[in-house]
Amino acid sequence: MSKTYGEWLKAAREEAGLTQQQLATMALMTRSHISHIEAGRRVPSEEDARRLDLALGTGDVLTSFRPSSNDDDILADYFAPARHLERQATMIREFALSFFPGILQTEAYARCVLGMAFPPPPPAECDKALVARLERAQILQNPTSPVVWALLDEGALRRPIGGPKVMAEQIEHVITLTEARRIRTHVLPMSLGYHPLLDSMLTLMWFKDQPPAAYSEGARTGKLHESPAVIEALQGRYDLSLSDAMPRDQTLAFLKATAKGYREHG
């Protein structure tokens, strides 16, 4: 039986006489990242694979034979590792600054977001990305896991992506999930001014049998964080912002009023 990519990496590491931590240090990665790759829980990015090749002296083997998937072809390369972890998470806490998180997006809203990319993607590529975006939302079909919290900046509700009809449908979708207690939603009012998450979107993830992870994203860039110190700091920012958000019942009332406003102007 042929070895998997992770098994091959482990064998090459052991042949070089390196521990996971030693390889991680040489490749500028974390030990947990190496562990996930070897166990087949994560696919390395191209940059990860290049650094592993350099550290192990394996030429371009790990880069050339890096596993590919439909996700890698469709999603931004920087998001692919977070996508794999999202599927395994038992708890996800999202913060949305400018638009709704991917796992909460309706088809019409997602199509508008993806279609506005620059440069504009070809229609076929946009359709593939849309399918991938909607497949992410399937994790909510399980009635209990993962536990999902959505912290939404009011700006994400006020920005009429796709127009009033699309926005009303999007907000009503979140209302339905919230009222069914499938997700817990809170809104950070714009009147608050500054809050600790104002500089980027953030996803925090917890797992059954591995350390937590965090993913932050800005313009054309994303970063998967695995350092315990960094994750703890990001969790602290989330908690501080959440403490200033509207309570659940007030949030629901606000969402309903906002959706109604879009419906009346649609």
Image (cartoon, rainbow, N blue to C red):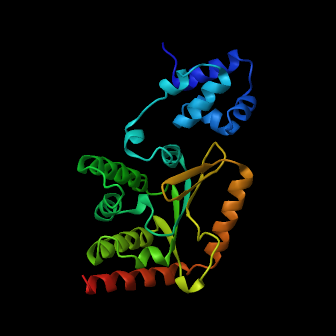
Examine the image and state in which quarter residue 241 appears.
bottom right
Relative to 229, does residue 178 appear above or below in the rendering?
below
Label count reads 0
Residue 42 in view in this figure:
no
Question: Residue 232 at what x, y percent from top left?
Answer: 71, 58
- Residue situated in front as seen by the camera: 120 or 72: 120
Residue under the image location 52 percent in, 17 percent down: 3
Q: Quadrant location of the C terminus?
A: bottom left
Residue 18 in view in this figure:
yes
Question: Residue 53 at what x, y percent from top left?
Answer: 60, 25
Examine the image and state in which quarter residue 253 appears.
bottom left
- Residue situated in front as seen by the camera: 45 or 165: 45
Relative to 145, does residue 238 appear above or below in the rendering?
below
Residue under the image location 66 percent in, 47 percent down: 226
Question: Residue 178 at what x, y percent from top left?
Answer: 44, 71
Question: Residue 205 at what x, y percent from top left?
Answer: 58, 53
